[in-house]
């Protein structure tokens, strides 16, 4: 077994399939566990689990939860976040006000 840690960043609040509630934008640690495939002439690993670290807030500050997620759900959440960021960058609210020609 091996574990790999990385960081993913969400620019907008997001949800994860199978979990209630919305998570705030920010950086989240991702933990990927893999097992070594035996019997091959080269080293190869198979993903066995993926977890997103969610930090507690309020009275749960200082605690964290490892939420099991699929690679597919993570990719979907990141894609939705990127699409929301793209839409926000092109919205009318992001445009400078137009001068009044009168």
Image: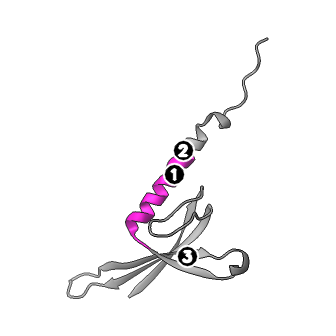
Q: Which residue lies furthest to the right in this view?
A: 102
Does residue 77 belong to the magenta stretch? yes
Answer few, some or many: residues within 10 Å of disc 1's Cα (few below 14, many 20 plus, some between 14 and 19).
some
Instruction: Look at 42% across and 64% down and name the residue there.
Output: 73
Residue 63 is situated, as x and y percent measured from the top left of the image, at 65, 82
Instruction: Look at 48% across and 53% down and name the residue there.
Output: 80
Q: Residue 86, which numbered label?
A: 2
Q: Main secondary structure of the magenta part?
A: helix
Answer few, some or many: residues within 10 Å of disc 2's Cα (few below 14, many 20 plus, some between 14 and 19).
few
Task: Tell me the magenta residue range.
Answer: 69-85
Residue 1 is situated, as x and y percent measured from the top left of the image, at 38, 88
Between the residue at mark 1 and the residue at mark 3, the CA separation in whole angstroms equals 20 Å
Instruction: Look at 72% across and 79% down and name the residue there.
Output: 59
Is 17 in front, or is 86? 17
Q: Residue furthest top?
A: 102
In the image, residue 26 above or below residue 88: below
Instruction: Tell me whether circle 1 and circle 2 mark residues in contact (CB < 8 Å).
Output: yes
Answer few, some or many: residues within 10 Å of disc 3's Cα (few below 14, many 20 plus, some between 14 and 19).
some
């Amino acid at each position: 077994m091996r574990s790999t840690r990385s960081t993913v960043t969400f620019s907008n609040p997001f949800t994860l399939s199978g979990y209630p509630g919305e998570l705030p934008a920010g950086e989240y640690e991702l933990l990927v566990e893999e097992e070594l495939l035996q019997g091959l002439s080269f080293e190869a690993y198979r993903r066995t689990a993926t977890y997103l670290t969610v930090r507690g807030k309020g009275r749960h500050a200082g605690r964290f939860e490892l939420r099991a997620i699929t690679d597919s759900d993570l990719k979907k959440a990141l894609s939705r976040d990127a699409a929301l960021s793209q839409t926000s960058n092109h919205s009318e609210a992001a445009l400078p006000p137009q001068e009044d020609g009168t």
